[in-house]
Image: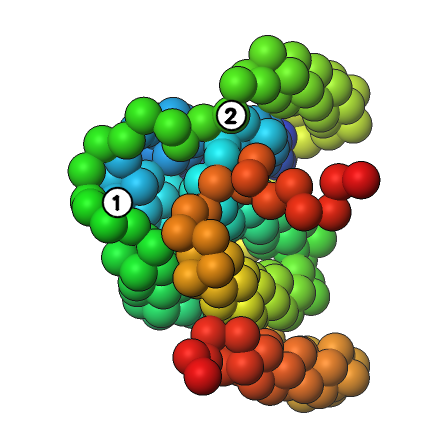
Amino acid sequence: MIASDVLVAQNVGFAIIAALMIFGALRVVTTNNVVHAALWLVVVLAGAAAQYILLAAEFVAVTQVMVYIGAVMVLFLFGTMLTRARIGAEKDLNNKNWYIGLPVAGLLLVTILIALKDGFGDEKMPADADLFTVAQVSDLIFGPYLLPFWALSFLLLAAVIGAIVLARRD
Amino acid sequence: MFVNQFLMLAAILFCIGVYGVIVRKNAVLVLMSIELILNSVNINLIAFSLRNGSADGHTFALYVIAVAAAEVGVGLAMVLLMYRNRRSVGLDELSGMKG
């Protein structure tokens, strides 16, 4: 009985967070203000972090908050600030081809949803799953997945050098 | 909790991101839509990780987060360069490669 109560609470939490995330995502792609889009993106990213906690992934949730909401959003706001003469509503943020974008996104959504319904149906998550510990994740990163980790380090180095070379003024 | 509810949430976010990439003209907003897409992929990875009971998905979600951070850094540097050269970040004005 206690377990079913917890599951009901989880489902209600999932529904609220999911609704917030979808609304925020829609605002990101429809709003007329770049700064507002960045702030709605924060809602979506924080909601994703909450879903990770629901899915027993605490380390990824913390990383999401630190990297995305901490670092990437600051980068976005800086980018907005540096490429914009004024901060406010604008008219010409969209292309004229929404009549291409809407059918493409809608068809993709319908296709994926049908495939998911066929593929997974009523399959349930394991109800009494343990929390994934940081030790488990780090054992994987520094064990079997060490080579991608090295590649990623090299990629980050290349990105840092590339960003400096691109943005330097001389 | 069903497996499908997380996968469907990720699918909806993915399609909203695709719509944003197609429709938006401002380069910064296109980068934000790409972030939406990468996040939906991360939700999928974490959901399958819980379903299969292994932490492999967590590892790859962390890698995706790192790649997204690198992508935003380089992407915003490119947008900045574009703004410096053309005084605009409209993607439809980048027609220099058209014959």
The subunit letter for the residue under badge 2 reads: A
Q: Does residue B9 appear anywhere in the picture?
A: no
How far across and how far down the image is residue A22, in percent? Answer: 41, 29
> Which is nearer the eye, B40 or A95?
A95
Q: Residue at (42%, 62%) from the top-left corner?
A: B84
Q: CA distance from mark 2 to mark 1?
A: 19 Å
The answer to whether B22 is drawn above or below residue A57 in the figure is: above
Q: Amino acid at mark 1?
A: Val
Q: Position of residue B64 (x, y in %)?
A: 61, 63
Question: In the shown orientation, is residue A41 left or right of residue A162?
Answer: left
> Which of the two labelled residues, at mark 2 and mark 1, occupies the earlier sequence position?
1
Q: Residue at x 19, y 38 (%)?
A: A88
Image point (51%, 25%), residue name: A95
The numbered mark at residue A103 is: none
Q: Circles 2 and 1: CB distance less than 8 Å?
A: no
- State the quadrant of the C terminus of chain B: top right
Do pointers 2 and 1 mark residues of a single chain?
yes
The residue lying at 19 percent from left, 45 percent from top is A87
Frontmost residue, B52 versus A137: A137
Q: Nearer the viewer, mark 2 or mark 1?
A: 2
- Badge 2 marks a residue whose secondary structure is loop
Q: Which mark is residue A35?
A: 1
Q: Amino acid at mark 2?
A: Asn
Q: For numbered disc 1, what is the local secondary structure?
A: helix
Looking at the image, residue A66 sits to the left or right of residue A168; the answer is left
The disc at residue A95 is 2
Q: Is residue A156 left or right of residue B27?
A: right
Tag 2: Cα neighbours inside 10 Å, few (<14), some, or many (≥20)?
some
